[in-house]
Amino acid sequence: MKKKDKDFSDKIFYWILKILGYGTMVLLAALVVVLLKVSFPIFEKFGLKFFILNDWNPVTRVFGALPFIYGTVVTSLLAIVIAVPVSIGIALFVTEIANSKIKKILSFLVEMLAAIPSVVYGLWGLFVLVPWLRNSVEPFLGKYLGFIPLFYGAPYGVGVLAAGIILAIMIVPTVSSICREIFYSVPNLFREGALALGATHWEMMKLAVVKSSVSGIFGASILGLGRALGETMAVTMVIGNRPQISPSLFSPAQTLASLIANEYNEASNSSHLAALTAMGLVLLMVSLAVNTFAKIIQKRFQMRTGVGK
Amino acid sequence: MKSLSSALSFNDYRRKLINYMMIGLIVLGAFVALAPLFSIFYYVIERGYHNLSWTFFTSLPAPIGESGGGMGNALLGSLKIIGMATLLGVPWGIATGVYLSEYSYGKSSKTLRFVIDLLMGVPSIVIGIFIFTVVVRPMGGFSAYAGAVALAIIMCPIIARSTEEMLKTVPIHYREAGLALGIQRWKVILFILVRGKWGAIMTGVVLGVARISGETAPLLFTSLNNQYWSGSLKDPTSSLPVQIYTYSISPYEEWQMQAWTGALVLIIFVFLINLVIRSFFSNMRDSRD
C-alpha cells in the first residue's frame, strides 16, 4: 500500500488510531512507574533486604517478602509439575489418538474449563476440593509417605497442595492448547518415518512428536507459570493465608497475590500500603519477565520449525 | 537362531505392552483433567438451584441469620460496571487492533504487539492496585467508575489482538481495490475492511466481555462492595463476582448457599455467551470461507 495522506480526514483518523494504539504502551509504562513510586519508601527503608526478610508485621512496620515469594513459587511450581504432563497427554490424545468427533468434544470441554471464572474455582476448591483433601487424600499420603518432609504434618485441607491443584486445573487449558498447536505443526513426515521404521504408536508419539517439540513445550510451561504466578482469587480462597515457610505441602501458606487481596483494603498505615504495592510491583515485574522469556522461546521455536519446512 | 527370534518376540511383546499402557495412561489423564469440570458443574447446580428464584434477581441480600434475599444489587452493579468497561475498552481495543493491522509495520509494530501481549499477561490484581492509586484515591472513594476502568484495561488488549487477527485475514486486494477507486483510506478501512469483518470482530468483543464478567481481583479495591443498591456511579458498587467471594468466605451457611447460586448464575451467563458465539462463529466460517 502506498501512503498518500493528501486528505486531512485521513490524517485525523490515522492520528486517533495511533494515539489509542500507543496508549497501551503508555499504560504499561504508567503501571510500572506508578507502582514504583508508591512502593519506593519500602525499598528505601529495607533495600534488597525486603526480599529476604522472613517477617511480616504491619504493626511494627517490618515488611519482608520472603514467605510470600516462597508461597508463590512453590504453589506455581507444583501446578506446573501437575499440569504439564496432563496437558501433554491431552494434546497427544487430541492430535494423535482421537478421531475428529472426540477431538471436537474434548477441545470444547477444555475450553469450557478455561471459561470458568476464577472465583467459581475458588468456591469449588473451598467447599469440595479442600474437604476431600483433608478427609481422604492428605491422611492417606501422610500415612504411607509421611516420612518424606513433603507429606509431613496435620492435614488441614487448605494449604499449598490445594492451591497447587487448583492452579494446575486452571492452567491446563492454556498449556494444552499451545501444546496442541505445536504438535499439529510437526510435519507428518516425522510420524510416517517413525512408523515405517517399526515404531509402535507410543514410540512414534514419543520420538517424532514430543521430542521434536521439547522447546515449544517448555515455552508453553513458562506461559502457564506466568498465569499461575498472578492468579489471585482461587488461591486466596484455598491456601489458608498464613505467611510461613514450611517444606510440607499440607501446611497453609500465603502468596503475593493472596496477600494483596487479603490486606490491601484493610491496610493500617501508609507504609503497610506501600509494602503491599511493592508486592504488586514484584508480581508485575515477574510476570513481565516470564512472559518475555516465553516469547523468546516461542520465537526460537517458530524459527526452527520454519527452517525445517 | 531360535533363541534370537524368541528374544525378539519378547522384546516386541514388551514394546506392545508399553504402547497400550501409555495410550491408556494418556486417555486416562485426559479424563482425569476433565473431572473437575464435571465436578464443578455438578456442585454448582446441586447447591445453587435451591435459591434460584425471581427474588434472587430482584431483591437485596438478606440480613445475617435470615434466609432468602438475593443478589439484585450485585447483578445490577455488574451490569453497570461491565457496561461502562465495554464502552471504554471496546473502542480502544478495536482502534488499537486496526492500527496494528493497517498502519503499523516493521520494528515499531513488533514492539507494540509485544507490549500488548505483555499487558495481557499482567496479573489482574496488579491492575486493581494501579487503579486504586490513580483513580480511587484522587476521586476520594471506591466507585463503579474505577471498577469499569480496571476491567476496560483488562479487556483492551484481548480485543486489540483479536481485531488485528481478523483484519489480517482480509486479502490485500480489497484494500487496493478500494484505494484505486479513489476512496479515502479511512473510509476503506472502516466501511470495507471493518464492516466486512464486523461479525468476527464482534465475536472477539463478546468473548472479551465474557472474560471480564468473571473478574474479581481488580474489583476488590476499585468498586469494592455494597450491601445496598448503590445510588450513583460514584458510590461503592456491588458486583456478582465480589459478592460470591464475600459470601463464600463468610462463616454463615445461608450466605455460602447464596454464593453457590451466584456462581450458578455467573457460569450460566459466561457459558451462554461462549456457546452462542461459538455457534454463530462456526456458521459464519462455513458460509464465508
Image: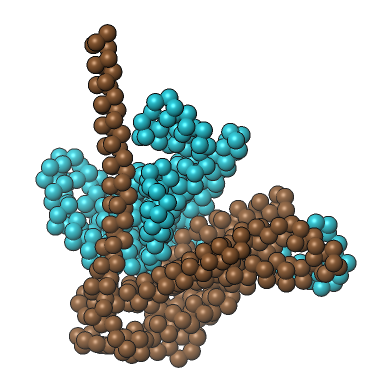
**Hue used for the chain lettered A:** cyan
Residue located at (28% from left, 47% from top): B28
Q: Is residue B106 left or right of residue B155?
A: right
**Hue used for the chain lettered B:** brown
Residue located at (32% from left, 74% from top): B264
Looking at the picture, does residue B171 appear above or below residue B237?
A: above
Give percent across and percent down for residue A65: 38, 54
Quadrant in the rendering for residue B11: top left
Looking at the picture, does residue A187 appear above or below residue B47?
A: above
Residue located at (66% from left, 51% from top): B110
Q: Is residue B161 left or right of residue A222?
A: right
Residue located at (80% from left, 56% from top): A1
Q: Is residue A26 left or right of residue A275?
A: right
Quadrant in the rendering for residue A129: bottom left
Quadrant where the C terminus of chain B sits is: bottom right
Q: How many numbered discs?
A: 0
Quadrant where the N terminus of chain B sits is: top left
